[in-house]
Image (cartoon, rainbow, N blue to C red):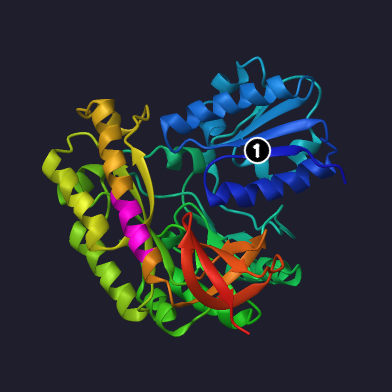
Amino acid sequence: MSAPDIITMGCRLNTFESEVIRDHAGRAHLDDTIIINTCAVTAEAERQARQTIRRASRKNPGKRIIVTGCAAQLDPAGFAAMPEVDHVIGNEEKMKAETFAGLNGHPEVRVADIMTVRETASHLVKGFDGRARAFVQIQQGCDHRCTFCIIPFARGNNRSVPLGAIVEQTRTLIGEGYREIVLTGVDICSYGSDLPGQPRLGEIVKRLLVQVPEVERLRLSSLDPAAMDDTLFDVLATEPRLMPHLHLSLQAMDDMVLKRMKRRHLREDALRVGERARAARLDVVFGADLIAGFPTETDAMFENTLDAVRDMGLTHLHVFPYSERSGTPAAKMPTLPVVERKARAEKLRAAGDESFAAFMNAQIGQDAHVLVEKNNRGLTQHYVAAEISGGADAGDIVSGRVTGVRDGILQVQRVA
């Protein structure tokens, strides 16, 4: 089966969806095609999408270019107007085989109203290009309306994948040799609110690990600290196959900023989540999404967020300077100068780097379990890059002792 070139931008969910697209487009024999799966989480992400399109066209003259993903969903006319673009496909349409089978020679736009979509179909993906880990989509869309966020309008409302389909997808991937599964979606802590019985995320994680005992490692994508259920903490405490790395969608750690963001947690709620997680699993580490320079954020408000990096020991930060998104309430609020937003973002990153370095140094002498991806390197249970001394094969899970840190990578000596 021929395969198109696919460029994936943005989140883990896009990574999963790009594999579905790869299969659909390959079956449609779109081998002389470049498909760009875009992101729109910030204005910068959309700018990078346009830049990527132009670069791909320059480097591949004569190839057809299809643009899809969140940026395409939000501004189909804008992307269709680009001379480099042949087709624009929406987020719902990109997941359908008939979309790619039905593309004809002339430029066209296939983007429906995402807010009318009520279900998320299961898509069986048998492999991931060049990865030892595999992603399973359990949920799509978001029912919340944070004042800074445009993504619900690109992804639609919350829609959950039934457990049976999640189990089937996971078994398929395990059968293909994948040793780690990552459960992903737009807002996975809202999983199940649209299903009979309204099962919560923790219950699904627990049942998945029972029904597919062959799963060796399970990870979760970004978690909303306002919606982590009791069962999820119980599974963290009792199930070693759930990896001790939680990525929290914090965005800020000042109460006033959080209220203006229309987030559902306050600073104390997030701190309590950290305490509960560490009580459940002593070695758990935290990542976090943080926005620097949100409208009306004072120096004191920013310091509360900066302090939280150290207070919570956040080791894996995704920091974004605030970026106006047209159509969101925050875009109408009094903004900070861009230079100040960038300066605050740099301070957060520096604090995160300091916290990460301290964590890495503390790992020396500790045990590590590394899923090898390539070139003797992979990720530990804490989602940290590691290198195996003496070599290892891709796909192996190697247990060893951390002997040092070099260039931000743990050095691990295999234990016989």
Q: Is residue 92 magenta?
A: no
Position of residue 401 measured from the top left corner of the image (x, y, whole percent): 51, 77
What's the residue at 59%, 63% (across, down)? 378
Whether residue 135 appears in this view of the structure is yes
Look at mark 1 in the image and give the residue it sits on. 7
Position of residue 178 measured from the top left corner of the image (x, y, whole percent): 69, 67
The quadrant in which residue 59 appears is: top right
| Tally of numbered tags | 1
Q: Is residue 382 left or right of residue 308?
A: right
In what quadrant of the picture does the C terminus appear? bottom right
The quadrant in which residue 232 appears is: bottom left
Helix, strand or loop for the magenta stretch, by majority: helix
What's the residue at 57%, 40% (across, down)? 9
Q: Is residue 387 left or right of residue 250?
A: right
Q: Secondary structure at mark 1?
A: strand
Q: Is residue 104 left or right of residue 290?
A: right
Picture layout, residue 288 above or below residue 229:
above
Position of residue 259 measured from the top left corner of the image (x, y, whole percent): 20, 47
| Range of residues picked out in magenta | 351-359
Picture layout, residue 157 above or below residue 170:
above
Whether residue 382 appears in this view of the structure is no
- Amino acid, disc 1: Ile
**Furthest residue in direction left, as rendered:** 300
Return the residue nearer the eye: 282 or 10.
Answer: 282
Q: Is residue 357 magenta?
A: yes
